[in-house]
Amino acid sequence: MNFLEALGRWALFYVAEMGRMLIFVLSAFGWLARPPFRAFQAVKQLHFIGYKSTFVVVLTATFTGMVLALQGYHTLRKFGSEGLLGAAVAVSMIRELGPVLAALMVTARAGSAMTAEIGIMRITEQIDALDTMAVNPLQYLIAPKLIAGLIGVPLLVAIFDVVGIYGGHVVGVELLGVNSGTYWNSIESAVEWKDVYGGILKSISFGLIISWVCCYKGFFTKMSAEGLGNATTEAVVLSSVLILVWDYFLTALLFNL
Amino acid sequence: MLKLVGVTKTLGGQPVLRGVDLVVPQGKLTTIIGRSGEGKSVLLKHMIGLLQPDSGEVWVDNVEISRLRGHALNEVRKRFAMLFQGAALFDSLTVFENVAFPLREKLRLKGADVTTRVEEKLDQVGLAGMGHKFPAELSGGMRKRAGLARALVMQPEIMLFDEPTTGLDPLMAKSIHDLITSMQRKFGFTAVMVSHEIPEIFGISDYVAILKRGKIAAMAEPAEFQRTTDPEIKEFISVGGTLPMASSAKGVL
Ligand SMILES: Nc1ncnc2c1ncn2[C@@H]1O[C@H](COP(=O)(O)OP(=O)(O)O)[C@@H](O)[C@H]1O
Ligand SMILES: [Mg+2]
């Protein structure tokens, strides 16, 4: 009985929380459609999420591409098909690893900072101050971050894919001796429009998940330093988990139809 | 006119306001005093609709604002400006941009209009030439004064000041008090101030209200407090053993 009660309470809490999150993001998008348009804010956020994440994304992508080529080469060689190395690297990069790893890196780097920034603004009453000046915080603070996530993450994923494929080239061609022409040709013949399109769709939705979750957790931070720490942790965990779960369902939908 | 009727509020399981009745006279400076944690900041936030009462009403002229939302609430808020206890400056903006913010956002002013008004206010709060600094580079007292400049620059009908002089040295506190009273006299706005500066506030306020155990225990003109026989109020207002009125009134005015 007690267990059921606890379970029920837990379930109710999460249903209510999901409802709050949905209202939060819908009102932010609603405010986006109303003037004044915060183009400058959006560009600033894009610079923060996008440009400032470039280094860590390039670094991760390089090593991911390199290790993929290393692993792929030894597996493919067993079947005498080293010539397919480029295809193996590119397809796993574009379909899966690019979007997921880039999104996880952005969550860790920019998402947590977003939660902390908004959370501090909540604790130090800057969000209340916006309200008293009749400036809607969802419009001024949150909407530009949502836009930046939607645009910035796909751009970072594109960089991740390209750099990763070059990383694979370095290991596969220059270290392991696969023919360079073969590497590029196999990519050209194996990668389909559907892969690219799927990757873009994934990265857009991951971008939304990151800004949504991280803004929400910051916006409703409990009024203490401990609350701020918890909010940041929860934002990173929830955003990462949602990315992986959503990735599974989107993959099932996109590639298995 | 600003009026609270039977306002109650429980926060974090603790009853903070237990039926506040308060009429703030138009065009006057009313100061609310009370111990730390008594709910003075919470009370101010009810006046501008940042917090909603659990029960009771908040009237701004003939609008009951406690159940207002969205556009209607914004329209009421445009008549207010507030200085927060912690100043609540925007970290990502310079001091100049902070003070310019309400001019640009609320009044849609641009260019030279903004610059003139911002620099005038920064000068008045003693922050001339500090406009390019970020809030993190200022001391607590300087942040407070920047917050004050941001509130005063709007010249609204109703001003809320949450501890404008806490953390300032006595000279600076006096000049801030002078600034508030002279602005108040010049523009005639209705002002509500929360302060611990006893006895100084008795010299500058038109009315003083005491918040105690979640209610307004007393509200009167400063002179009347001198004649009070209530021992608790007497103790409260005669901090340091001196009777507030005689010593302060002339010194500050
Ligand atoms: N957002 C909040 N959540 C929970 N408790 C709060 C909140 N704001 C204020 N309180 C509590 O209400 C009481 C009054 O706070 P406050 O109005 O800040 O006091 P003060 O008179 O010093 O300004 C305090 O006990 C404080 O902990
Ligand atoms: Mg306070």
Image: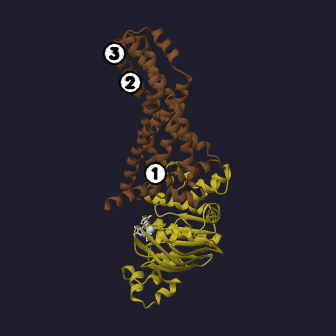
Seen at 38% across and 47% down, the residue is A233
Instruction: Mark 2 vs mark 3: tell me if same chain.
Output: yes
Percent x, y of residue A230: 37, 51
* Label tally: 3
**Which of labels 3 and 1 is toward the front?**
3
- Disc marking residue A63: 2
Would you say A70 lies left or right of A198 here?
left
In the rendered image, the quadrant that contains the C terminus of chain B is bottom right
**Chain holding disc 2:** A
Badge 2: residue crowd in 10 Å (few <14, some 14–19, many ≥20): some
Q: Mark 3 near mark 1, Cβ–Cβ under 8 Å?
A: no
Question: Which residue does the numbered mark 1 point to in the structure image?
Answer: A218
Question: Which residue does the numbered mark 3 point to in the structure image?
Answer: A74
Ligand 1, by image quadrant, is bottom left
Q: Secondary structure at mark 1?
A: helix
Closer to the camera in the image, B236 or A248: A248
Instruction: Mark 1 vs mark 2: tell me if same chain.
Output: yes
Check the rendered structure and report the hue given to chain A: brown
Badge 1: residue crowd in 10 Å (few <14, some 14–19, many ≥20): many
Check the rendered structure and report the hue given to chain B: yellow
The answer to whether B91 is drawn above or below residue A166 in the figure is below
Res. B129 visible in picture: no
Seen at 50% across and 31% down, the residue is A156
- Disc marking residue A161: none
**Which quarter of the picture shows residue A46?**
top right
Seen at 44% across and 33% down, the residue is A100
Would you say B167 lies left or right of B127 here?
left
